Image: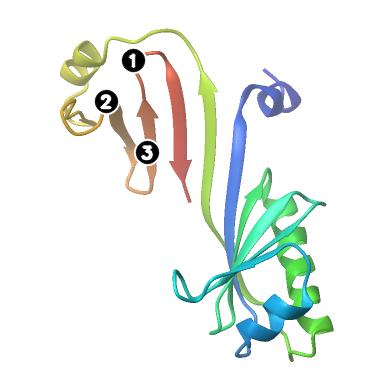
C-alpha cells in the first residue's frame, strides 16, 4: 500500500508543543484576536483556531503553545508558526523555541474482533478490563499504544 493510500485510510491528529520564549497577556490576546475562547475561571489558557491548516492552539501565559488538529508533522509546524506570528503581531517578543511533536494519533476501522481471545493470546502486551473500559490497550513499545474495540476500530497513539 503506497503512502497516499495510507493517508486516505487513517484519520490522523498530530499534537505539537512549542515555547514562544516570553510571557503572554491572555486578556490582551482574547480582546484583540479572532476565533478565540477564553474563560480564566474554567482553565487559564486561550484557545485560538485557524482555518489553514485547520488547527486549534492552547496558549498559556507562560508562553507555551500546544497545537492540535494537524494531519501531518509539517502541517503542525506550519500551524504553530502561524499562531506564533499572531502573537508577534500583538506585540509580544515571540521566538520559536523547542518545537516538539507530543503525540501522533491515527484511527481506522477494520473487522470485528474478539477482545477476550485477543487478550488471552497476547497477555504480555494487552491490558483489558471490560468493567473499566470496553477496549484493549495493546502496548507496541513503551511510547506506542493501540486501542482496539470489539467492532474493529483501531486507534494508534505514540510520540
Q: Separation of disc 1 and disc 2 at Cα?
A: 8 Å
Tell me where residue 57 sits by quadrant. Answer: bottom right
- Note whether 3 is above or below 152 in the view shown: below
Give the x, y percent position of residue 7. 69, 29
Along the horizontal axis of the image, is 31 left or right of 109? right
Tell me where residue 120 sits by quadrant. Answer: top left
- Of mark 3 and mark 1, the one earlier in the sequence is 3
Q: Separation of disc 3 and disc 1 at Cα?
A: 16 Å
Q: Residue at x 70, y 85 (%)?
A: 28
Q: Quadrant of the N terminus?
A: top right
Q: Nearer the viewer, residue 36 or 147?
A: 36
Q: Nearer the viewer, residue 118 or 135?
A: 135
Local crowd at mark 3 within 10 Å, few (<14), some, or many (≥20)?
A: many
Q: Separation of disc 3 and disc 2 at Cα?
A: 16 Å
Q: Nearer the viewer, residue 136 or 101?
A: 136
Tell me where residue 32 sits by quadrant. Answer: bottom right
Residue 145 tag number: 3
Q: Residue at x 60, y 49 (%)?
A: 14
Q: Which residue is mark 2?
A: 134
- Note whether 71 is above or below 82 in the view shown: above
Amino acid at each position: 500500500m503506497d503512502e497516499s493510500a495510507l493517508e486516505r485510510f487513517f484519520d490522523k491528529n498530530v499534537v505539537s508543543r512549542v515555547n514562544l520564549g516570553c510571557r503572554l497577556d491572555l486578556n490582551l490576546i482574547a480582546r484583540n484576536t479572532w476565533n478565540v475562547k477564553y474563560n480564566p475561571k474554567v482553565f487559564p489558557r486561550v484557545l485560538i483556531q485557524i482555518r489553514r491548516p485547520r488547527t486549534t492552539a492552547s496558549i498559556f501565559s507562560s508562553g507555551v503553545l500546544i497545537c492540535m488538529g494537524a494531519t501531518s508533522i509539517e502541517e503542525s509546524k506550519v500551524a504553530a508558526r502561524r499562531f506564533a506570528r499572531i502573537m508577534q503581531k500583538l506585540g509580544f517578543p515571540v521566538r520559536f523555541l523547542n518545537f516538539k511533536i507530543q503525540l501522533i494519533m491515527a484511527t481506522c476501522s477494520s473487522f470485528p474482533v474478539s477482545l477476550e481471545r485477543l487478550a488471552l493470546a497476547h497477555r504480555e502486551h494487552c491490558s483489558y478490563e471490560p468493567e473499566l473500559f470496553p477496549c484493549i490497550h495493546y502496548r507496541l513499545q513503551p511510547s506506542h499504544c493501540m486501542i482496539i474495540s470489539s467492532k474493529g476500530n483501531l486507534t494508534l497513539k505514540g510520540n
